[in-house]
Image (cartoon, rainbow, N blue to C red):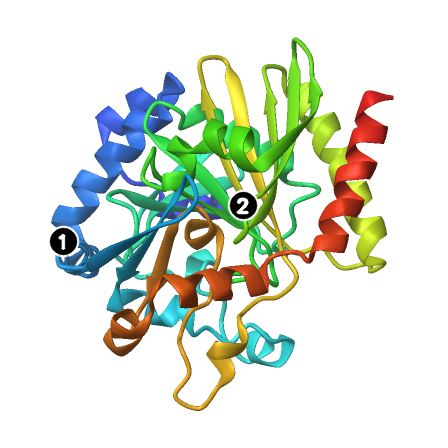
Amino acid sequence: MKLKRLRPAQTRLIKDDEINRLANNDEFAEASERLMQLQLNEWKQLAEGYKSLADVKTKEFLFDGFRIKLQFNPERIKSTSADVDDESIKNRECFLCEKNLPPEQKGILLLEDYLILCNPYPVFPQHFTIAAVRHRPQEILSSFNDLILISKYLSKKYTVIYNGPKCGASAPDHLHFQAGTKQFMPVENEFHSLINEHGELLVVDESLTVAIVNDGLRTFVTIEASEDKVLLNAFDVFYLIYSSMIKSSEEPMMNIICSYDKSAWKVIIFLRRKHRPSQYFEEDGIMFSPAAVDLGGVCIVPLEKDFKRIDEKLIAGMLKEVSLYKEGYDYIKAALKRKLKN
């Protein structure tokens, strides 16, 4: 008699009756919270990561109607300094594939194709990695639908983020999202004030609102939609415009923050031109490699010397350097206004 072959994820699923009950009722936010509680008791590395998080230092800079926080978090050094060039990726094992996860790390299956995993190097008060069960590249066009579904499932407690393969993803070879405590990033609370003070509404109707923002440090597109089909169509239009502008077969550089609340999605798409600022590569440079959380207003540095010397002017300059240039911003604004109104 042949043994039935388990799906790969089944060997990683946490065994807990309460989590099974919550997941079966699609209460994945509550299930994830319980997963965190259980893993903190069972997995020493995770407990140490959260103990370190309690001791991080922060400072805050005020700009024109918005805030940027700086967090000194030494546990994030592996992510911040990750080598993500093709050769480095080829020569290391994928740390998100099941066979390479720490033995203690367990997860919850979501959408039959993703594992919700506790992140042992947290930035958020509760921080998860949502990794595809199957090893495939980090790519948003075919997975945006999954992103918005996951954000809806986790909406009671968490916001979901995506980092593009060339702008912050430390595993560009393995599709994954991250989820963290809602309202932790300042941009979530400042969403509408940023649009009002630094942006322009491009489309406003009953089911869709699209805006574009340049606050002097960051450039981003926002999409608010109550229907998934409307949101998917708006994203497809945006992606086509952005791709045509860069004239490349590679994914345009972007970071995404996605949340679901009161029967509607809010999506923030940060527009990028560089992975890391020039200061990163200087002798005695600054180890700052911005991704979605950083652009969302919580900038992470793993070295104390960098935390001490970064001031308002320096953080503003680095964020502006990695954000899309003015001509590109103007092109996307005009094209979105034209295409979406049609």
Q: Which mark is residue 113?
A: none
Quick check: can you spot residue 1? no
Tell me what residue is drawn at x 24 percent, y 44 percent: 125
Q: Name the residue beneath numbered marker 2.
A: 215
| Residue placed furthest toward the bottom | 283
Write down the residue under mark 1. Answer: 54
Left or right of residue 262, residue 67 in this image: left
Instruction: Please state which of residues 20 and 84 is positioned toward the viewer in this rendering.
Output: 84
Question: In the image, residue 325 lies at what x, y percent?
Answer: 69, 58
Q: Amino acid at mark 2?
A: Asp
Q: Are marks 2 and 1 in contact (CB under 8 Å)?
A: no
Res 228 visible: yes
Q: Residue at x 76, y 46 (%)?
A: 330
Q: Position of residue 120 (x, y in %)?
A: 28, 57
Q: Considering the image in quadrants, where does the C terminus appear?
A: top right
Q: Position of residue 126 (x, y in %)?
A: 27, 42
Residue type indicated by callout 1: Ala
Badge 1 marks a residue whose secondary structure is loop
